[in-house]
Amino acid sequence: MPVRIRLRLAPLCLLPQLAFANGSEPPLFTPRPIAAHIYDGDWEHFVGGGLASLDCNGDRFPDLVAAGGSNPVQLMVNRTKTPGANVQFTADTPEALTPTGVTGIYPLDIDGDGILDLAVLRVGADQLLRGTGDCQFEPFDDLGFSSGDHWTTAFSATWENGAQLPTLAFGTYVDRSNSDGPFEACDDTLLYRPEGHRYGPPNRLKPGYCALSMLFTNWHRRADGPAQGRADLRISNDRHYYVRDGQEQMWKMTTPPVLYQQDDGWAPYHLWGMGIASRDLNGDGFSDVYLTSMGDQKLQLFDPAGIGPSYRDVTYDYGTTAHRPTSGGDGRPSTGWHADFGDVNNDGLDDIFVTKGNVEQMPDAAMRDPNTLLIQGVDGRFADAAAAAQIASMARSRGAVLRDLNLDGRLDLAVVNRRAPMELYQNATQATGNWLSLSLRGIAPNTQAIGAFVELDTGTRIHTREITVGGGHAGGSVGDLHFGLGEAQGLQLRVIWPDGETTEWQAVPPNQHTTVIQ
């Protein structure tokens, strides 16, 4: 099928389009009002509390869906009046989204109709909800999906070759039916591979090690050509409950799936694994990962010279461990949850946002544990600017969304908190650089082009993005990709679609929205 690139001009950012002088001033956010919402509940809701963003009514403004735990889910419809106006949301939750016990939510187009659906993670039976347009949802009645009573805390999805439906992975936590638990009582990962246009019973991926985040990623791809191979399933696990013998996992998505071992290039890692964020940080065309945990957070760069899925820890000098609070006066170790990459000052360098907060009352961890905003310098090192940016919340934060919520070219922020109100921040940074907003439309049934790679050549480096569903902590975002560009003007863009079809390099102007259609 011919490949078309459709350019849609969005209003230019009203700020001076100057390259941000890295380190000369911090980013700045201002709080915005949002409807009252709290993630609450007993032990089962110490974890979870995810936040999802999607455009559920077709106006391009991202809407939000927040897990509630013992409280109901809330859908926040984006009512921002025009691009660049103050961010505004209105709570307008359809009946199908009112159940309690929800730990997390991930948007994706399951049935290939071009309207986003929802995977709802619960303490109890998980749900797949069909989007019907205008931010309305209803249960799927024809997919054959059936979930048992699990404590689900992680999710990811991918499209395997020739499939009519996505492959779904649900990560479960502690098996509550195990009378010997909760320690060393982790439940299995549930993998749903489609059988035509329906799902059969799940494949149980054993052993499970109490998953709190998972991500299908195609680590095989070549840096200089079309995508190849398949997406494999990376899982971040909580050593607090697997205690011993467990580790981080990577499942090779063969039939049946098998775990990568050290002989395959996979190194064992032991974390209090909470969240996964993925981004090519060093410009080599391969996705690197940021893993949240208690104590040290871990940034790992993919090693293309390795024999398999080989990732190497960066050194402490990178400044990415975020292991203790940098404000608030509590010197005990931090607890990281959700992580997200994004260029908050549009200087062409990706930054990292991490939600923090005590599990509940763990005495060995910081109680005043503010969220972290790691700003990347020109030397590749990071420094926390959350306090200066006025987003260093002391609440027990869990899920978050780092997206351009008012379409002005700057990334805004929303955060779900445990036992504290949800927070919304608008990016008010003045000295920002150029930017580009990009969306993809794939061929049905994979209308989101999950598994595609986007390459943006700025003249000094190539920014590579892998299109995925999953990761984070109990919530994810779909929709426009945001690129900070600094002073770059002459841009070249190409897309490697999931089937390997590759567009020609095309010139795209900065400071606008671009849609690429397969």
Image (cartoon, grey):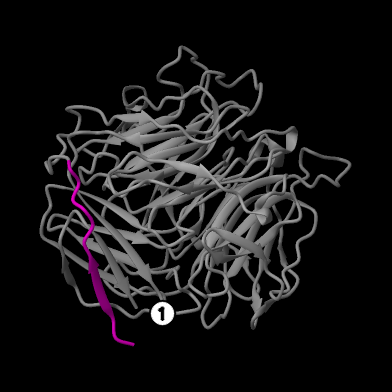
Tell me: residue 82, above or below residue 43.
Answer: below
- Residue 235 in sight here: no
Q: In which quarter of the image is residue 490?
A: bottom left
Left or right, 429 with respect to 208, comes to left
- Residue 427 in sight here: yes
Helix, strand or loop for disc 1: loop
**Residue segment shown in magenta:** 1-14
Left or right, 138 with respect to 162, comes to right
Q: Residue at x 56, y 41 (%)?
A: 274
300 falls in the magenta region: no
Image location (x, y in percent) of residue 5: 25, 74
Image location (x, y in percent) of residue 397: 54, 31
Three-letter amino acid code at disc 1? Asp
User: Magenta stretch: dominant SS?
Assistant: loop
Please state, as top left, top right, bottom left or bottom right, where the N terminus lies in the image.
bottom left
Tell me: residue 381, above or below residue 361.
Answer: below
Residue tagged 1 = 499
For the view shown, which residue lies furthest in the front direction? 81
5 falls in the magenta region: yes
For the view shown, which residue lies furthest in the bottom direction? 1
Badge 1: residue crowd in 10 Å (few <14, some 14–19, many ≥20): some
Image location (x, y in percent) of residue 53: 48, 51
Please state, as top left, top right, bottom left or bottom right, where the C terminus lies in the image.
bottom left
For the view shown, which residue lies furthest in the top direction? 329
Left or right, 176 with respect to 432, comes to right
Count of labels shown? 1
Image location (x, y in percent) of residue 170: 65, 58
Q: Residue at x 22, y 57 (%)?
A: 512
